[in-house]
Image: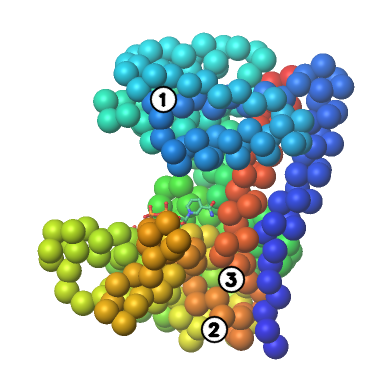
Amino acid sequence: MAAKIIDGKEAAKEIKQQLSAEAAAMRQAGYPVRLVAVQVGHDDASKYYTNMQARQAQAIGIDYELVELPESTSQTDVIGRILKLNADAAVSGLILQMPLPKHINAAAVQLAISPDKDVEGMHPENMGRLLTGGALVAPCTPMAAMELLRRACPDLAGKEAVVVGRSTIVGKPIAMMLLQMDISATVTVCHSRTKDLAGHTRRAEVLVAATGLSQSIWQRYQQQKAAGKAVGLPDLSPLISADMVAQGAVVIDVATNYIPAGFDEAGEPLKDERGEIALKSVGDVDFQGAMQRASAITPVPGGVGPVTVAMLLKNTIACAKAAR
Ligand code: NDP
């Protein structure tokens, strides 16, 4: 039987309805929720994200402000601005838009954001609380992955969970969340040095994939090609093939790989109507193949991605409530 598709768009809609009610209650009680994003310099991708954040925050009744600082702003001045926003009781949460100009140390600036307003859940203090328990906020993508996982599999206690990927912002926090007492999965974390990846994934009752390997391979190939060093076409097939998925597993595919939609007979990537390489987004898992083995699976796109923004808004309301 084909797997159930875990619909991230539908889940995000439900979560945002709930958050909208919470934001309205806060406003009525005299505590409007306010999210501030700080952007230094101009970046097209960042503009896309800030527009999306503004739209989604305002749609659920969260005030949104974008603070745009010139490219030339010094690190000291960016930190100074963040400290002022930390001290402003009307600001519930802060986002630092990436990328920052090269003369600014992103880690130093991120550290300046108060853990109480860290709606991206990336401050070391909030990361630490993931280990010790009692976290007010957590990184948004891991929260989104767990939200979808719990919808598909409410009782995770004792389940064999395998997380593929160990980054600080995705893989490790997901592993920590799976270990927490109220979840109590048995967790294995795999990475690029793991021997026999398939041996681990095949015994996973819960499989979380978060590597972005296909996109990394594509990017490396393009660099080699530009340098005249590319040999043959890259293998962009998914890291996790259908035979690596256990029968009945719940699969959460966190990855978003932007890779060519196809290649012509000469091995050149197909172009879109603007003459640019036509890209498609895919996960780490062979979705069609895994559909025949898994019991439930997230699609890419339309799985973890839409829920991630909802989790940012959830963290913002959590920070606002804690500050009352
Ligand atoms: P990183 O590049 O920081 O980490 C990738 C991880 O994958 C590393 O731990 C790496 O291992 C591991 N890995 C690489 N190759 C293999 C392999 N052959 N076998 C097993 N493990 C491997 O990526 P991120 O964690 O930042 O992102 C992961 C994916 O999640 C990306 O596709 C990204 O686009 C997506 N993402 C999605 C979001 C969303 O909202 N849906 C938000 C954030 C990220 P090692 O540590 O040994 O190098």
The residue under the point 58% across, 36% down is: 51
Q: Where is residue 274 shown, x and y percent of the image? A: 42, 56
Residue 130 sits in which quadrant?
A: top right
First along the sequence among labels 1 and 2: 1
Reading the image, the residue beneath label 2 is 289
Q: Position of residue 53 (x, y in %)?
A: 61, 37
Residue furthest left as drawn: 228
Q: Is residue 57 toward the left or the right of residue 286 in the image?
A: right
Q: Name the N-terminal-most of marks 2 and 3.
A: 3
The residues bearing labels 1 and 2 have C-alpha atoms spaced at a distance of 43 Å
Give the CA separation, mark 1 to mark 3.
37 Å
**What amino acid type is highlighted by mark number 1?**
Val
- Disc 1 is placed on an element classified as strand
Secondary structure found at label 3: strand
Residue in the foreground of this view, choosing between 268 and 250: 268
Give x and y (percent) for residue 205. 59, 75
Q: Secondary structure at mark 2?
A: helix
For the C terminus, give its image quadrant: top right
- What's under tag 2, amino acid-wise? Gly
- The residue singled out by tag 3 in the image is 251
Quadrant for the N terminus, please: bottom right
Q: Which residue is mark 1?
A: 40
Label 1, residues with CA under 10 Å away: few <14, some 14-19, many ≥20: many
- Amino acid under label 3? Val
- Mark 3 or mark 1, which is nearer the start of the sequence? 1
